[in-house]
Image (cartoon, grey):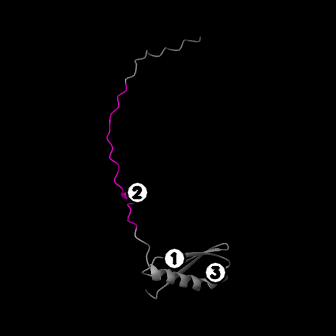
Amino acid sequence: MSDELKVVVSLKGDRALVGVKSPDCDPVFFSSQGTLKAVLKAVPGFVEEAKTRWETSKLNPRCETPLPSQEKPATTTSRVATVSRPKTAAPKTQPSMF
């Protein structure tokens, strides 16, 4: 594993999202609450937890199922439907009111 590491902290109010990334590993995300100072104190623990996860699995399993955009369209047979309708008389004209 590389000794290069990226840590990103995103704050919104009193909530934080912390991402930890190493070049050959998938990122690991953590959520925390508190001030920036409190979140920064928790970062070393997040980094250690990420390294522990990467020891067993650096990358998430590859998806082997086809994505919906990759599926072949269903084969359909087209039929032309003919409907016989009874012949109707021409509509009557509206009578003059004046």
Q: Nearer the viewer, residue 55 or 47?
A: 55
Q: Quadrant of residue 56?
A: bottom left
Question: In this rendering, which labeled residue sits more in front, label 1 or label 3?
Answer: 1
What amino acid is at disc 3? Val
On the image, the x and y values in percent for residue 19 come to: 54, 77
Q: Mark 1 or 3 closer to N-term?
A: 1
User: Residue 39, which numbered label?
Assistant: 3
Q: Give how far apart the Cα atoms at labels 1 and 3 are.
A: 16 Å
Q: Give how far apart the Cα atoms at labels 2 and 1 are.
A: 27 Å
What amino acid is at disc 1? Val
What residue range appears in magenta?
63-83
User: Residue 28, which numbered label?
Assistant: 1
Circle 1 residues within 10 Å: few <14, some 14–19, many ≥20: some
> Which of the image's four quarters has the C terminus?
top right
At 66% from the left and 82% from the top, the residue drawn is 38
Q: Mark 2 or 3 closer to N-term?
A: 3
On the image, the x and y values in percent for residue 26 come to: 46, 76
Circle 3 residues within 10 Å: few <14, some 14–19, many ≥20: many
Q: Give how far apart the Cα atoms at labels 2 and 3 are.
A: 39 Å
Say above or below: 86 vs 52.
above
Which residue is the site of mark 2? 68
